[in-house]
Amino acid sequence: MVRLLLFFAVLVGLAFGFAWLADRPGEVTFVWQGWHVETDVMTAAIAAVAGLVAVIFVLGVVRSIWNSPGVIGSFFGRRRREKGWAALSRGMVAVGAGDLSTAMKASGEARQILGTEPLALLLEAQSAQLVGDRSGAKKAFERMLENPATRLLGMRGLYVEAVRWGDGEAAARWATAAATAAPKLAWASHAVVEYRSQARDWMGALESIDRNRRNGIVDKQAARRQRAVILTGDGLEREQSHPEVVRTHALEAHGLAPDLVPAACLAARLLARSGDLKKATRVLEATWKLDPHPEIAETYAHLRPGDSAKDRLARIRDLVKVRAHHPECALALARAEIDAHDFAEARRTLEPFVAQSPSRRVCLLMAELEQNEHGNAGATRAWLARAVTAPRDKAWVADGWVSDHWMPVSPISGKLDAFEWKLPPEDVSSAPVADLFDEPTETLAASGSVVPLEAPKVAREAITAAVTTVEAEVIVPEKPAQETKPNPTVTPANPPVVEAKPIEVPTAAPAPAPTAVSATSSGATVPTAHANGSKPPEPVIPPPPDDPGTEGGAPMPKKRFKLFS
């Protein structure tokens, strides 16, 4: 529309110009090389315009002839590039569809036509990854490093390749280089934090977290949580060597993440060691109020060394008042009551759990209660057999790995703050253990996750052994309890221990009627049976002595039952 208006404006201007010249006639005369020309002004103007048009036309023809080679070359070059871009598009679609032959053919064609075009290099690298050509993909990404425009893309590709093939050191090196070149690159910054955490470079991890927070890669809440996890991991390693420094870090971690149970327990232990029991109890009560946890109850009960079992029971009763209706409160209270030999109260505390579907922990507490209160071996064995197939209790779980203690970094994926307190899988033996340990990088490469710097070498054996076998000990007293003449070498506080072979724990069908009591080296007790099916004589279990902390007597060893959970 604008061009049309300009065209009409030019025509109107020419019309007015010629009309103006026509209204003012005149003569034009010039002499050149003997030529004498006379004409009117209108004719001279028309001749001048025609001459100008002719000059412009001649110049256009000359320029077209002069530029014709370049025009012809540009035409064929444009067609060639269009062919290359078509091959590139076809190759990208083939890579996405998993068409190996088409992707390789299109990659070679695009690479031949487009040369060092970044997308052509990317297609070549992705095609090599599709066929498992590690060296080809690596060379393609390394060529990207030569061009500043594709340098970060090359680093990202080399990082993903290192993760894909399980080269943790190379992955950490490329992630660090990318984070240095572009501090606001999210994937590189997150990877650096996790790799430094895996390497136990806690101070370096804290610096990376602070930098990510300043660059807006993580929000304030996430940065506070990560910092608390790092400080707790550092504190657990240096709890014995640098208690003063660790106490400060643990308190900071508790302030950053009050729901982080290991931080609260660490801070409370160090505060109690320094004599500040009041502050230690406040720290544990604050975390207990958010979410009761058995580790908090255990730490709370043993804040002051040397306390009797009844003193610990009184302390636990104060703790459970914070969240009186939580199930963990009742279990912690039952644990303390059994230790204090208040068996009647312990039985009343566990009665609501027994009436429903008791978990393994409840079954083990009941087995210990039956053994310590009545010495009833049959009831004890019944509860132990029931514990084998009972629902599992909550545990620390990360990436399918069940651990009896918290860790700042997952031993499977290397992820920071991966452990959660939750119910583990019911059947650990059916979990894809091979996928977790044989080729961990194949499942992580698609998302570019961090691959651990050092993969756990005995993880498979640890899981298998924990699920299928337990080390057992058979406790047999030297003489029956009704003997009047005491044996100076054998007392209830020091019963002889006879080691037995490991036994398999059934995971699907209930165990057959057990005939003996076996206790694990860590305090677990499981039923055993004779190989020939005969029933061995039942051991006579003497009644436990009174609590040494309240009424004196010989110290009694702790008899706690625990199964892998």
Image: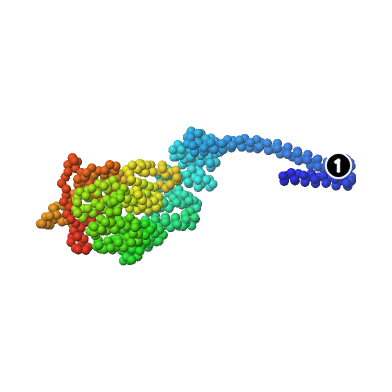
Q: Could you tell whether 30 is left or right of 7 in the image?
A: right
Q: Which of 524 and 29 is in front in this view?
A: 524
At 81% from the left and 42% from the top, the residue drawn is 49
At 35% from the left and 65% from the top, the residue drawn is 279
Is 234 placed above or below 120 here?
A: below
The type of colouring in the image is rainbow
Q: Could you tell whether 57 is left or right of 530 in the image?
A: right
At 11% from the left and 55% from the top, the residue drawn is 483
Give x and y (percent) for residue 519. Answer: 22, 50
At 33% from the left and 66% from the top, the residue drawn is 278
The answer to whether one can see residue 409 in this image is: no
Residue that mark 1 sits on: 43
Q: Nearer the viewer, residue 463 or 100?
A: 463
Q: Could you tell whether 564 is left or right of 375 in the image?
A: right
Q: How many marks?
A: 1
Q: Could you tell whether 361 is left or right of 188 in the image?
A: left
Q: What element carries label 1?
A: helix
The answer to whether one can see residue 323 in this image is: yes
Give x and y (percent) for residue 556. Answer: 20, 58
Q: Which of 119 and 447 is in front in this view?
A: 447
Is the residue marked by circle 1 packed among few (<14), some (14-19), or many (20+) residues within 10 Å? Answer: few
Is 374 placed above or below 71 here?
A: below
Give x and y (percent) for residue 116. Answer: 54, 41
- Residue reaching furthest left? 485
Which amino acid, mark 1? Thr
